[in-house]
Amino acid sequence: MSTTPADVERTVVDFLKRLEKLPEGFDATTPLYADGVGLDSLETAELSALLEDELGSDPFSTGDLPQSLAEIQAYYAGV
């Protein structure tokens, strides 16, 4: 399965819109947690499951906790 950075961005942005947590000026370097988007642990688990369902794998399953969209995109670039 080929996953482009645009596919990953679309999946993440749609998820954040659904949660009403898409900050103005969001880009690939915006932190996903704390002072950035502010995802909590349940929302992070939901994002992990969504990435698995939509894209066939997820970076969270490697034991890493990607801090931004750019890190999630980098994971898929290496898959």
Image (cartoon, helix red, strand yellow):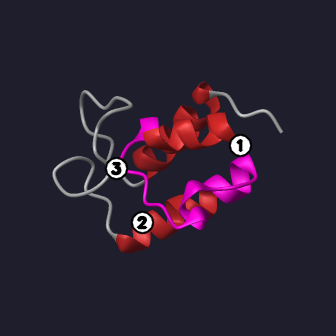
C-alpha distance separating marks 2 and 3: 12 Å
Which residue in the structure is indicated by mark 2?
Answer: 43
Question: From the viewer's perspective, is 40 left or right of 1?
Answer: left
Three-letter amino acid code of the residue under disc 1: Val
Report if the CB atoms under discs 1 and 2 are less than 8 Å apart.
no
Residue hosting label 3:
20
Q: Earlier in the sequence, mark 1 or mark 3?
A: 3
- Residue 60 in the image: x percent, y percent? 54, 62
Q: Secondary structure at mark 1?
A: loop
Q: Position of residue 11 (x, y in %)?
A: 57, 41
The crowding category of the residue bearing disc 3, from other C-alpha atoms within 10 Å (few below 14, some 14 to 19, many at least 20), is few
Which of the two discs, 1 and 3, sits closer to the camera? 1
Query: Which of 14/7 is in front?
Result: 7
Element type at marker 3? loop
Q: Which mark is residue 79?
A: 1
**Is residue 68 found inside the magenta-colored segment of the image?**
yes
Residue range in magenta is 51-70
Disc 2 or disc 3, which is closer to the eye? 2
